[in-house]
């Protein structure tokens, strides 16, 4: 009897409880209440996309240089992508693992990729398809057929309007509003709008008017707003992080706006090819793509990663090859997980119900999660790997549909029979990736271990963890 008691204490030290084999399995326990703010469905879809293709394509594609601006006096006849194939773009996006495409419908030069009624400076004035072509229509249709979400970038800057104005509009604000309205009402569902904030304050447009129109015509869209629209449509906006490229770890989605706490995560924008537009140069290397991924997706952001279609209207085959290898690497990170086979235990779980037990962190399901009781803001989740295992990193996820909660955490490895702290952080958010020796963990090396432990040291409300994954490449 003494031996059995000792064995139980050894297997379940300090109150660790297994996720199964308990009468608690049949208990009905009240789920955690949302910890406000929470993402709306459009924002959550954006988070789950993880990374999205940015496609810069327009007049500057046919005036290649190291200057991406454009100045409004470019010749529309130069726009002639004779082999344009929107379906090829979508296939390239899927090959790279992108869940969406955001198109530059109009860039700073003012040339419109759709036959707009607001200006003659558009595809209708080009020789492409005899002036009957429409890049926006074709890509929107291809995205829907390919089950890839579709977004619109519409430059606030318009050098062509600055030089030539519009006979039908007294102000640029009215001109721009009509362009957004066309795009919002003629091409079906829009999943994301992207408003470049450069020079936005100086234009003094009626941004709330634009926001209200978007809310009416595209209620399911997420809006990258450069802080121009978030007070008008605060339930769907995403933010400018302050720079292009990778962002910082410990991303905080909770932002005070107009005296109210809002869900307002950052969207990084990253150049993978060209100077935004195709300029004859190849895409960045596979390693650089991986590093950008680790310093954006790995920090809890959903980045726009720019791929530039060429002047033929297609994405370079060499770029597609790199994107395929990139997706294979991303898949490898997520599939090489010895923790899936491990036995998870926890220091305590919500109402002692199996619905919220430790095993939810490695069951491979997004909508199941470990949770503590209300008022319990610390936790310890342990996964026994069964044998000594090579540890290359970790992937953590917090169940954000019910809010962002974790404020401080550490990761430990059991090596040689001893627990060793190997990492500490503040925020988890939608996803946190730590990969040994790479861009977001350059100086970190993890020991081989037969068990791993996630300790939530502080949370704003009972912590909810839906993924605690080990990377072992």
Image (tube, helix red, strand yellow):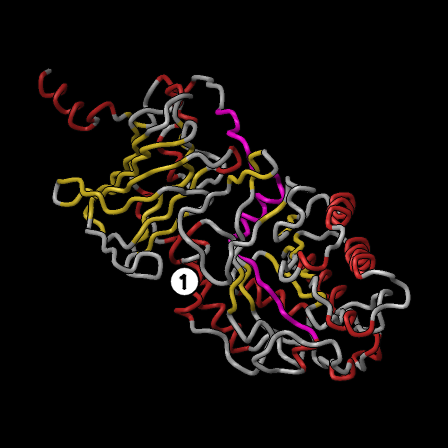
Examine the rendered structure and indicate whether residue 334 appears above or below residue 80.
above
Look at the image and give the residue range highlighted in magenta.
Answer: 32-58
Q: Position of residue 191 (x, y in %)?
A: 67, 51
Can residue 196 be seen here? The reply is yes
Left or right of 399? Residue 372 is: left
Q: Which element carries disc 1, helix, strand or loop?
A: helix
Q: Residue at x 16, y 23 (%)?
A: 9
- Name the image quarter holding the C terminus: bottom left
Can residue 331 be seen here? The reply is no
- Name the image quarter holding the N terminus: top left
Looking at the rendering, which quadrant does residue 362 occupy?
A: top left
Q: Label 1 belongs to which residue? A: 329
Q: Nearer the viewer, residue 209 or 266?
A: 209
Magenta span contains residue 431 = no
Q: Nearer the viewer, residue 358 or 457?
A: 457
Q: Position of residue 76 (x, y in %)?
A: 78, 80
Q: Nearer the viewer, residue 470 or 303?
A: 303
**Label 1: few (<14), some or many (≥20) within 10 Å?**
some
Looking at the rendering, which quadrant does residue 417 occupy?
A: top left
């Amino acid at each position: 009897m003494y031996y059995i008691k000792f064995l139980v204490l050894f297997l379940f030290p300090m109150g660790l409880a297994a996720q199964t084999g308990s009468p608690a399995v049949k208990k009905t326990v009240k789920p955690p209440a949302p910890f406000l703010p929470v993402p709306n469905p459009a924002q959550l879809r954006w988070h789950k996309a993880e990374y999205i293709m940015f496609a810069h394509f327009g007049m500057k594609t046919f005036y290649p240089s190291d200057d991406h601006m454009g100045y409004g006096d470019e010749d529309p006849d130069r726009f002639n992508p004779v082999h344009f194939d929107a379906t090829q773009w979508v296939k390239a996006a899927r090959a790279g693992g992108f869940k969406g495409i955001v198109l530059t419908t109009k860039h700073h030069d003012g040339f419109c990729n759709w036959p707009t009624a607001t200006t003659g400076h558009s595809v209708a004035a080009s020789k492409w398809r005899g002036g009957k072509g429409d890049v926006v229509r074709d890509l929107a249709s291809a995205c829907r057929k390919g089950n890839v979400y579709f977004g619109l970038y519409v430059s606030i800057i318009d050098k062509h309007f600055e030089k030539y104005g519009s006979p039908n509009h007294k102000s640029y604000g009215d001109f721009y509003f009509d362009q957004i309205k066309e795009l919002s009402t003629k091409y079906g569902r829009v999943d994301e709008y992207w408003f470049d904030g450069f020079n936005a304050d100086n234009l003094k447009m009626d941004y709330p008017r634009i926001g209200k129109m978007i809310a009416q015509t595209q209620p399911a869209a997420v809006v990258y707003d450069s802080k121009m629209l978030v007070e008008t449509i605060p339930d769907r906006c995403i933010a400018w992080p302050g720079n292009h490229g990778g962002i910082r770890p410990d991303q905080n989605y909770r932002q005070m706006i107009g005296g109210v706490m809002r869900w307002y995560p950052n969207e990084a924008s990253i150049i993978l090819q060209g100077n935004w537009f195709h300029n004859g140069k190849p895409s960045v290397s596979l390693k650089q793509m991986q590093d950008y991924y680790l310093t954006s997706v790995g920090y809890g952001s959903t980045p726009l990663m720019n791929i530039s279609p060429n002047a033929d209207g297609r994405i370079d085959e060499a770029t597609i090859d790199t994107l395929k290898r990139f997706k294979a690497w991303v898949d490898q990170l997520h599939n090489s997980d010895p923790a899936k086979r491990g036995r998870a235990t926890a220091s305590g779980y919500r109402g002692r119900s199996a619905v919220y037990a430790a095993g939810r962190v490695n069951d491979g399901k997004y909508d199941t999660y470990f949770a503590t009781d209300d008022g319990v803001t610390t936790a310890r989740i342990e996964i026994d790997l069964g044998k000594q295992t090579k540890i290359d990193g970790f992937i953590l996820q917090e169940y954000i549909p019910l809010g962002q909660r974790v404020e401080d955490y550490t990761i430990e490895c059991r090596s040689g029979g001893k627990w060793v702290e190997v990492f500490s952080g503040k925020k988890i958010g939608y996803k946190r990736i730590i990969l040994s020796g790479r861009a977001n963990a350059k100086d970190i090396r993890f020991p081989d271990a037969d068990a791993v432990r996630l300790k939530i040291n502080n949370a704003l409300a009972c912590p909810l963890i839906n993924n605690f994954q080990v990377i072992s490449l």
